[in-house]
Amino acid sequence: MSDVAERLEELRDRGLYRRLRLISGPQGPRVLLNGRPVLLLCSNNYLGLADHPKVRGAAAEAAMRWGAGAGASRLVSGSMEPHRRLESQLAEFKGYEAALLFGSGYLANSGVIAALAGSGQVVFSDELNHASIVDGCRLSRAETFVYRHGDLEHLAWGLEQADGCGALIVSDGVFSMDGDVAPLPELLELARRHDCRLMVDEAHATGALGRDGRGAVAAAGLSGEVDIVVGTLGKALGSYGAYVCANAETVDLLLNTARPFIFSTAPPPPSVAAASAALELISPHRVERLQANADRFRSALAAEGLEAGRSRTQIIPIEVGEAEPTMALCERLLERGVFAQGIRPPTVPAGSSRLRLTVMATHRVGELERAAKLVGGAARELGLVAPQPLTA
Ligand SMILES: Cc1ncc(COP(=O)(O)O)c(C=O)c1O
Protein backbone atom coordinates (compact mmCIF):
# COMPACT_ATOMS: atom_id res chain seq x y z
CA MET A 1 0.00 0.00 0.00
CA SER A 2 1.40 3.44 -0.90
CA ASP A 3 1.90 6.03 1.84
CA VAL A 4 -0.90 8.06 0.23
CA ALA A 5 -3.29 5.09 0.33
CA GLU A 6 -2.29 4.47 3.94
CA ARG A 7 -3.10 8.02 4.90
CA LEU A 8 -6.48 7.83 3.18
CA GLU A 9 -7.19 4.53 4.95
CA GLU A 10 -6.33 6.12 8.28
CA LEU A 11 -8.76 8.98 7.61
CA ARG A 12 -11.49 6.42 6.77
CA ASP A 13 -10.74 4.45 9.97
CA ARG A 14 -11.08 7.61 12.06
CA GLY A 15 -14.35 8.66 10.41
CA LEU A 16 -12.60 11.72 8.97
CA TYR A 17 -12.64 10.89 5.25
CA ARG A 18 -14.29 13.68 3.19
CA ARG A 19 -15.76 13.65 -0.29
CA LEU A 20 -17.47 16.13 -2.56
CA ARG A 21 -21.22 16.04 -3.08
CA LEU A 22 -22.42 17.17 -6.49
CA ILE A 23 -25.26 19.68 -6.51
CA SER A 24 -27.06 21.29 -9.43
CA GLY A 25 -28.04 24.93 -9.59
CA PRO A 26 -26.91 27.96 -7.59
CA GLN A 27 -26.64 28.23 -3.80
CA GLY A 28 -30.33 28.86 -3.15
CA PRO A 29 -32.41 27.72 -0.19
CA ARG A 30 -33.19 24.53 -2.13
CA VAL A 31 -30.78 22.65 -4.43
CA LEU A 32 -30.71 19.38 -6.35
CA LEU A 33 -28.32 16.86 -4.84
CA ASN A 34 -27.73 13.86 -7.10
CA GLY A 35 -30.93 14.90 -8.88
CA ARG A 36 -33.03 14.98 -5.68
CA PRO A 37 -34.35 18.24 -4.18
CA VAL A 38 -32.96 19.06 -0.72
CA LEU A 39 -33.27 22.00 1.63
CA LEU A 40 -29.81 23.59 1.79
CA LEU A 41 -28.93 24.27 5.43
CA CYS A 42 -25.17 24.60 5.20
CA SER A 43 -24.43 27.45 2.81
CA ASN A 44 -22.88 30.76 3.84
CA ASN A 45 -24.93 32.57 1.20
CA TYR A 46 -26.69 34.10 4.19
CA LEU A 47 -28.63 36.87 2.47
CA GLY A 48 -29.41 34.93 -0.69
CA LEU A 49 -27.32 37.31 -2.79
CA ALA A 50 -25.16 34.70 -4.59
CA ASP A 51 -28.16 33.81 -6.73
CA HIS A 52 -29.76 37.28 -6.87
CA PRO A 53 -30.46 38.36 -10.47
CA LYS A 54 -28.80 41.78 -10.01
CA VAL A 55 -25.66 40.21 -8.57
CA ARG A 56 -25.47 37.66 -11.37
CA GLY A 57 -26.15 40.42 -13.89
CA ALA A 58 -23.32 42.56 -12.49
CA ALA A 59 -20.90 39.63 -12.78
CA ALA A 60 -21.98 38.93 -16.36
CA GLU A 61 -21.66 42.58 -17.38
CA ALA A 62 -18.22 42.89 -15.77
CA ALA A 63 -17.06 39.74 -17.56
CA MET A 64 -17.99 41.34 -20.88
CA ARG A 65 -16.47 44.73 -20.06
CA TRP A 66 -13.36 43.82 -18.05
CA GLY A 67 -12.79 40.18 -18.95
CA ALA A 68 -12.82 36.98 -16.92
CA GLY A 69 -9.54 37.52 -15.06
CA ALA A 70 -7.43 40.30 -13.56
CA GLY A 71 -4.28 39.18 -15.40
CA ALA A 72 -1.81 39.52 -12.53
CA SER A 73 -1.29 41.12 -9.15
CA ARG A 74 -2.57 44.72 -9.28
CA LEU A 75 0.96 45.92 -8.50
CA VAL A 76 2.14 44.29 -11.72
CA SER A 77 -0.44 44.68 -14.49
CA GLY A 78 -2.45 47.61 -13.18
CA SER A 79 -5.43 48.12 -10.94
CA MET A 80 -8.88 47.97 -12.54
CA GLU A 81 -11.81 50.26 -11.92
CA PRO A 82 -14.14 47.60 -10.34
CA HIS A 83 -11.51 46.89 -7.66
CA ARG A 84 -11.04 50.56 -6.80
CA ARG A 85 -14.79 51.10 -6.68
CA LEU A 86 -15.45 48.13 -4.37
CA GLU A 87 -12.65 49.21 -2.03
CA SER A 88 -14.16 52.64 -1.56
CA GLN A 89 -17.65 51.13 -1.09
CA LEU A 90 -16.32 48.72 1.56
CA ALA A 91 -14.32 51.38 3.41
CA GLU A 92 -17.44 53.52 3.63
CA PHE A 93 -19.70 50.61 4.60
CA LYS A 94 -17.36 49.57 7.41
CA GLY A 95 -16.48 53.09 8.54
CA TYR A 96 -12.74 53.01 7.75
CA GLU A 97 -10.33 55.27 5.88
CA ALA A 98 -9.30 52.61 3.40
CA ALA A 99 -9.82 49.05 2.20
CA LEU A 100 -7.73 46.58 0.22
CA LEU A 101 -9.00 43.55 -1.69
CA PHE A 102 -7.44 40.10 -1.38
CA GLY A 103 -8.02 36.89 -3.32
CA SER A 104 -9.93 35.22 -0.47
CA GLY A 105 -10.51 35.44 3.27
CA TYR A 106 -7.94 32.71 3.73
CA LEU A 107 -5.34 34.76 1.88
CA ALA A 108 -6.30 37.97 3.68
CA ASN A 109 -6.00 36.49 7.17
CA SER A 110 -2.76 34.68 6.48
CA GLY A 111 -1.25 37.70 4.75
CA VAL A 112 -2.33 40.41 7.17
CA ILE A 113 -1.18 38.65 10.34
CA ALA A 114 2.19 37.84 8.78
CA ALA A 115 2.54 41.48 7.66
CA LEU A 116 1.69 42.96 11.07
CA ALA A 117 3.59 40.63 13.41
CA GLY A 118 6.99 39.01 13.24
CA SER A 119 9.75 37.25 15.03
CA GLY A 120 10.27 38.46 18.62
CA GLN A 121 6.62 39.54 18.92
CA VAL A 122 3.52 37.81 20.24
CA VAL A 123 0.14 37.32 18.56
CA PHE A 124 -2.85 36.54 20.80
CA SER A 125 -5.41 34.28 19.14
CA ASP A 126 -8.72 32.84 20.40
CA GLU A 127 -8.60 29.03 20.44
CA LEU A 128 -11.66 28.81 18.16
CA ASN A 129 -10.38 31.21 15.50
CA HIS A 130 -10.65 30.12 11.88
CA ALA A 131 -7.87 27.99 10.32
CA SER A 132 -6.76 30.91 8.14
CA ILE A 133 -5.96 32.90 11.29
CA VAL A 134 -4.13 29.94 12.77
CA ASP A 135 -2.07 29.65 9.58
CA GLY A 136 -1.44 33.41 9.53
CA CYS A 137 -0.03 33.15 13.06
CA ARG A 138 2.25 30.30 11.94
CA LEU A 139 3.44 32.21 8.88
CA SER A 140 4.20 35.34 10.88
CA ARG A 141 7.00 33.63 12.83
CA ALA A 142 5.74 35.49 15.90
CA GLU A 143 5.07 33.53 19.06
CA THR A 144 1.35 32.68 19.29
CA PHE A 145 -0.47 32.78 22.61
CA VAL A 146 -3.72 30.85 22.14
CA TYR A 147 -6.20 32.00 24.76
CA ARG A 148 -9.18 29.95 25.87
CA HIS A 149 -12.31 30.76 23.90
CA GLY A 150 -13.54 34.24 24.84
CA ASP A 151 -11.62 34.05 28.14
CA LEU A 152 -10.56 37.64 28.84
CA GLU A 153 -8.73 36.77 32.04
CA HIS A 154 -6.60 34.23 30.23
CA LEU A 155 -5.89 36.77 27.49
CA ALA A 156 -5.02 39.49 30.05
CA TRP A 157 -2.64 37.08 31.74
CA GLY A 158 -0.97 36.30 28.41
CA LEU A 159 -0.62 39.99 27.59
CA GLU A 160 1.09 40.63 30.89
CA GLN A 161 3.49 37.72 30.32
CA ALA A 162 4.37 39.13 26.89
CA ASP A 163 5.80 42.16 28.65
CA GLY A 164 5.34 44.70 25.86
CA CYS A 165 6.14 42.30 22.99
CA GLY A 166 2.47 41.85 22.02
CA ALA A 167 1.79 42.92 18.44
CA LEU A 168 -1.74 41.82 17.70
CA ILE A 169 -4.88 40.38 19.28
CA VAL A 170 -6.90 38.53 16.65
CA SER A 171 -10.41 37.14 16.88
CA ASP A 172 -13.30 36.00 14.73
CA GLY A 173 -16.16 38.50 15.19
CA VAL A 174 -18.75 35.73 14.86
CA PHE A 175 -17.20 32.30 15.41
CA SER A 176 -17.62 30.18 12.31
CA MET A 177 -18.51 26.86 13.93
CA ASP A 178 -20.39 28.09 17.03
CA GLY A 179 -22.20 31.24 15.91
CA ASP A 180 -21.33 33.19 19.05
CA VAL A 181 -20.02 36.75 19.08
CA ALA A 182 -16.59 37.82 20.41
CA PRO A 183 -16.48 40.25 23.38
CA LEU A 184 -15.21 43.07 21.17
CA PRO A 185 -15.32 46.07 23.59
CA GLU A 186 -13.32 44.11 26.15
CA LEU A 187 -10.82 42.89 23.54
CA LEU A 188 -10.30 46.47 22.39
CA GLU A 189 -9.83 47.67 25.94
CA LEU A 190 -7.13 45.02 26.53
CA ALA A 191 -5.48 45.88 23.21
CA ARG A 192 -5.29 49.55 24.15
CA ARG A 193 -4.05 48.85 27.66
CA HIS A 194 -1.22 46.68 26.34
CA ASP A 195 -0.41 48.78 23.28
CA CYS A 196 -1.37 46.05 20.81
CA ARG A 197 -3.47 46.19 17.65
CA LEU A 198 -6.84 44.44 17.48
CA MET A 199 -7.82 42.58 14.31
CA VAL A 200 -11.35 41.21 13.88
CA ASP A 201 -12.46 38.76 11.18
CA GLU A 202 -16.00 39.68 10.12
CA ALA A 203 -16.44 36.73 7.72
CA HIS A 204 -19.70 35.62 9.33
CA ALA A 205 -20.73 38.95 10.86
CA THR A 206 -20.96 41.06 7.70
CA GLY A 207 -24.54 40.99 6.48
CA ALA A 208 -25.70 39.42 9.73
CA LEU A 209 -25.10 41.90 12.55
CA GLY A 210 -25.16 45.68 13.02
CA ARG A 211 -27.01 48.39 11.13
CA ASP A 212 -27.61 47.21 7.55
CA GLY A 213 -25.38 44.20 8.26
CA ARG A 214 -22.25 46.30 8.79
CA GLY A 215 -20.91 43.58 11.10
CA ALA A 216 -20.05 42.80 14.72
CA VAL A 217 -17.59 45.69 15.01
CA ALA A 218 -20.25 48.19 13.92
CA ALA A 219 -22.84 46.51 16.16
CA ALA A 220 -20.49 47.12 19.11
CA GLY A 221 -20.10 50.78 18.09
CA LEU A 222 -16.41 50.25 17.32
CA SER A 223 -16.16 51.10 13.61
CA GLY A 224 -12.86 52.85 13.03
CA GLU A 225 -11.71 51.89 16.56
CA VAL A 226 -10.83 48.25 15.99
CA ASP A 227 -7.54 48.59 14.13
CA ILE A 228 -8.03 46.01 11.38
CA VAL A 229 -11.24 44.48 10.09
CA VAL A 230 -11.06 41.56 7.66
CA GLY A 231 -14.03 40.23 5.74
CA THR A 232 -14.80 37.90 2.90
CA LEU A 233 -16.82 38.50 -0.26
CA GLY A 234 -17.65 34.79 -0.30
CA LYS A 235 -20.40 34.58 2.28
CA ALA A 236 -23.18 37.19 2.77
CA LEU A 237 -21.80 39.16 -0.19
CA GLY A 238 -22.45 36.16 -2.41
CA SER A 239 -19.24 36.28 -4.44
CA TYR A 240 -15.55 35.39 -3.97
CA GLY A 241 -12.57 37.37 -2.67
CA ALA A 242 -11.95 39.33 0.52
CA TYR A 243 -11.04 42.71 1.98
CA VAL A 244 -9.18 44.37 4.79
CA CYS A 245 -10.27 47.72 6.26
CA ALA A 246 -7.92 49.88 8.32
CA ASN A 247 -6.46 53.37 8.36
CA ALA A 248 -4.80 54.54 5.14
CA GLU A 249 -1.28 54.06 6.50
CA THR A 250 -1.90 50.45 7.51
CA VAL A 251 -3.51 49.68 4.16
CA ASP A 252 -0.46 51.18 2.45
CA LEU A 253 1.79 48.91 4.50
CA LEU A 254 -0.32 45.86 3.56
CA LEU A 255 -0.18 46.81 -0.12
CA ASN A 256 3.62 46.91 0.20
CA THR A 257 4.22 43.88 2.41
CA ALA A 258 1.29 41.42 2.52
CA ARG A 259 2.59 38.54 0.40
CA PRO A 260 -0.79 37.17 -0.79
CA PHE A 261 -1.59 40.67 -2.12
CA ILE A 262 1.76 41.08 -3.83
CA PHE A 263 2.32 37.56 -5.14
CA SER A 264 -1.14 36.44 -6.20
CA THR A 265 -3.46 37.42 -9.05
CA ALA A 266 -6.09 39.99 -8.08
CA PRO A 267 -9.71 38.79 -7.69
CA PRO A 268 -11.49 38.41 -11.06
CA PRO A 269 -13.49 41.50 -12.19
CA PRO A 270 -16.81 39.57 -12.36
CA SER A 271 -16.45 38.52 -8.69
CA VAL A 272 -15.54 42.06 -7.66
CA ALA A 273 -18.45 43.60 -9.56
CA ALA A 274 -20.83 40.99 -8.11
CA ALA A 275 -19.77 41.95 -4.58
CA SER A 276 -20.27 45.65 -5.39
CA ALA A 277 -23.82 44.88 -6.52
CA ALA A 278 -24.44 42.73 -3.43
CA LEU A 279 -23.29 45.54 -1.17
CA GLU A 280 -25.87 47.82 -2.75
CA LEU A 281 -28.57 45.23 -2.11
CA ILE A 282 -27.87 44.72 1.60
CA SER A 283 -30.85 46.22 3.40
CA PRO A 284 -32.24 46.23 6.94
CA HIS A 285 -35.08 44.07 5.61
CA ARG A 286 -32.77 41.28 4.42
CA VAL A 287 -30.67 41.37 7.61
CA GLU A 288 -33.77 41.30 9.84
CA ARG A 289 -35.17 38.41 7.82
CA LEU A 290 -31.94 36.46 8.38
CA GLN A 291 -31.97 37.16 12.11
CA ALA A 292 -35.69 36.28 12.42
CA ASN A 293 -35.16 33.01 10.51
CA ALA A 294 -32.23 32.13 12.79
CA ASP A 295 -34.32 32.84 15.91
CA ARG A 296 -37.25 30.75 14.63
CA PHE A 297 -35.00 27.86 13.66
CA ARG A 298 -33.18 27.87 17.00
CA SER A 299 -36.52 27.81 18.86
CA ALA A 300 -37.87 25.00 16.64
CA LEU A 301 -34.70 22.96 17.29
CA ALA A 302 -34.93 23.64 21.04
CA ALA A 303 -38.51 22.32 20.95
CA GLU A 304 -37.00 19.09 19.60
CA GLY A 305 -34.59 18.95 22.53
CA LEU A 306 -31.68 20.20 20.38
CA GLU A 307 -29.75 23.05 21.96
CA ALA A 308 -27.59 25.27 19.78
CA GLY A 309 -24.87 25.97 22.35
CA ARG A 310 -23.72 29.59 22.45
CA SER A 311 -25.15 30.51 19.04
CA ARG A 312 -26.68 33.97 18.73
CA THR A 313 -26.56 34.17 14.96
CA GLN A 314 -27.42 32.37 11.72
CA ILE A 315 -24.79 29.70 12.48
CA ILE A 316 -26.51 27.05 14.56
CA PRO A 317 -24.39 24.09 15.73
CA ILE A 318 -25.93 20.86 16.98
CA GLU A 319 -23.08 19.13 18.72
CA VAL A 320 -23.01 15.34 18.50
CA GLY A 321 -19.51 14.51 19.77
CA GLU A 322 -17.82 11.78 17.71
CA ALA A 323 -17.33 11.93 13.95
CA GLU A 324 -19.17 8.70 12.93
CA PRO A 325 -22.56 9.44 14.54
CA THR A 326 -22.34 13.00 13.23
CA MET A 327 -21.98 11.75 9.68
CA ALA A 328 -24.68 9.11 10.23
CA LEU A 329 -27.05 11.93 11.20
CA CYS A 330 -25.98 13.96 8.17
CA GLU A 331 -26.66 10.99 5.83
CA ARG A 332 -30.03 10.21 7.40
CA LEU A 333 -31.12 13.82 6.95
CA LEU A 334 -30.02 13.78 3.32
CA GLU A 335 -32.29 10.77 2.75
CA ARG A 336 -35.11 12.93 4.09
CA GLY A 337 -34.36 15.96 1.97
CA VAL A 338 -32.27 18.08 4.37
CA PHE A 339 -28.66 18.95 3.54
CA ALA A 340 -27.02 19.75 6.89
CA GLN A 341 -23.28 19.19 6.71
CA GLY A 342 -21.44 17.30 9.44
CA ILE A 343 -18.31 19.10 10.65
CA ARG A 344 -15.44 17.08 12.07
CA PRO A 345 -11.85 17.63 13.26
CA PRO A 346 -9.65 19.39 12.40
CA THR A 347 -12.34 22.00 11.63
CA VAL A 348 -13.64 21.61 15.19
CA PRO A 349 -11.85 20.22 18.27
CA ALA A 350 -11.84 16.40 18.72
CA GLY A 351 -15.00 15.16 20.44
CA SER A 352 -17.09 18.14 19.31
CA SER A 353 -18.18 17.02 15.83
CA ARG A 354 -21.48 18.59 14.94
CA LEU A 355 -24.02 19.50 12.37
CA ARG A 356 -23.34 23.11 11.45
CA LEU A 357 -26.71 24.42 10.36
CA THR A 358 -26.86 27.78 8.65
CA VAL A 359 -30.01 29.63 7.71
CA MET A 360 -30.49 32.12 4.90
CA ALA A 361 -32.75 35.14 4.70
CA THR A 362 -34.42 33.37 1.76
CA HIS A 363 -35.56 30.27 3.67
CA ARG A 364 -39.28 30.10 4.45
CA VAL A 365 -40.22 29.79 8.11
CA GLY A 366 -42.38 26.73 7.39
CA GLU A 367 -39.53 24.81 5.77
CA LEU A 368 -37.18 25.65 8.66
CA GLU A 369 -39.77 24.37 11.14
CA ARG A 370 -40.23 21.16 9.16
CA ALA A 371 -36.45 20.73 8.96
CA ALA A 372 -36.12 21.14 12.75
CA LYS A 373 -38.61 18.28 13.22
CA LEU A 374 -36.66 16.11 10.77
CA VAL A 375 -33.38 16.83 12.56
CA GLY A 376 -35.00 16.04 15.92
CA GLY A 377 -36.57 12.82 14.59
CA ALA A 378 -33.34 11.57 13.01
CA ALA A 379 -31.30 12.44 16.12
CA ARG A 380 -33.73 10.50 18.30
CA GLU A 381 -33.70 7.45 15.98
CA LEU A 382 -29.92 7.39 16.19
CA GLY A 383 -30.05 7.71 19.99
CA LEU A 384 -28.31 11.10 19.93
CA VAL A 385 -30.97 12.86 22.03
CA ALA A 386 -33.36 11.54 24.63
CA PRO A 387 -36.80 10.48 23.31
CA GLN A 388 -39.35 13.27 23.62
CA PRO A 389 -41.70 13.01 26.62
CA LEU A 390 -45.26 12.19 25.61
CA THR A 391 -47.50 15.22 25.89
CA ALA A 392 -51.03 14.90 27.24
C1 LIG B 1 -14.01 33.07 10.10
C2 LIG B 1 -13.54 32.83 8.70
N1 LIG B 1 -12.54 33.58 8.21
C3 LIG B 1 -12.08 33.42 6.96
C4 LIG B 1 -12.62 32.48 6.13
C5 LIG B 1 -12.05 32.28 4.76
O1 LIG B 1 -12.74 33.05 3.85
P1 LIG B 1 -12.72 32.65 2.30
O2 LIG B 1 -13.75 31.58 2.14
O3 LIG B 1 -13.05 33.90 1.58
O4 LIG B 1 -11.35 32.14 2.02
C6 LIG B 1 -13.67 31.69 6.56
C7 LIG B 1 -14.29 30.74 5.61
O5 LIG B 1 -14.62 29.66 5.80
C8 LIG B 1 -14.14 31.84 7.89
O6 LIG B 1 -15.11 31.07 8.36
Image (cartoon, rainbow, N blue to C red):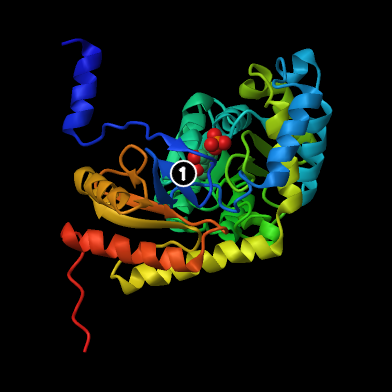
| In the rendered image, the vertical position of residue 208 relative to residue 297, given as above or below | above
Instruction: Kindly state the secondary structure of the residue where label 1 is placed.
Output: loop
Q: Residue 188 location in percent, x, y?
A: 61, 54
Closer to the camera, 210 or 183? 210
- Which quadrant of the rendered structure holds the C terminus? bottom left
Does the Cβ of the disc 1 residue fall within 8 Å of ligand 1? yes
Q: Residue 359 location in percent, x, y?
A: 49, 57
Closer to the camera, 9 or 140? 9
Q: Does residue 224 appear in the picture of this structure? A: no
Q: Residues within 10 Å of mark 1 (few under 14, many from 20)?
A: many
Q: Is residue 78 left or right of residue 378?
A: right
- Which quadrant of the rendered structure holds the N terminus? top left
In this figure, which residue is indicated by the disc labeled 1?
129
Closer to the camera, 25 or 47? 25
| In the rendered image, the vertical position of residue 113 relative to residue 93, given as above or below | above
Q: Does residue 384 appear in the picture of this structure? A: yes
Q: Residue 187 location in percent, x, y?
A: 56, 54
Quarter of the rendering containing residue 84: top right
Q: Is residue 142 left or right of residue 289?
A: left
**Residue displayed at 73% across by 39% down:** 57
Q: Is residue 97 left or right of residue 391?
A: right
**Residue displayed at 60% across by 65% down:** 289
Q: Residue 328 location in percent, x, y?
A: 22, 47
| The furthest residue to the top | 2
| In the rendered image, the vertical position of residue 27 relative to residue 281, given as above or below | above
What amino acid is labelled 1 in the image?
Answer: Asn
**Residue displayed at 24% across by 59% down:** 378
**Residue displayed at 81% across by 18% down:** 78
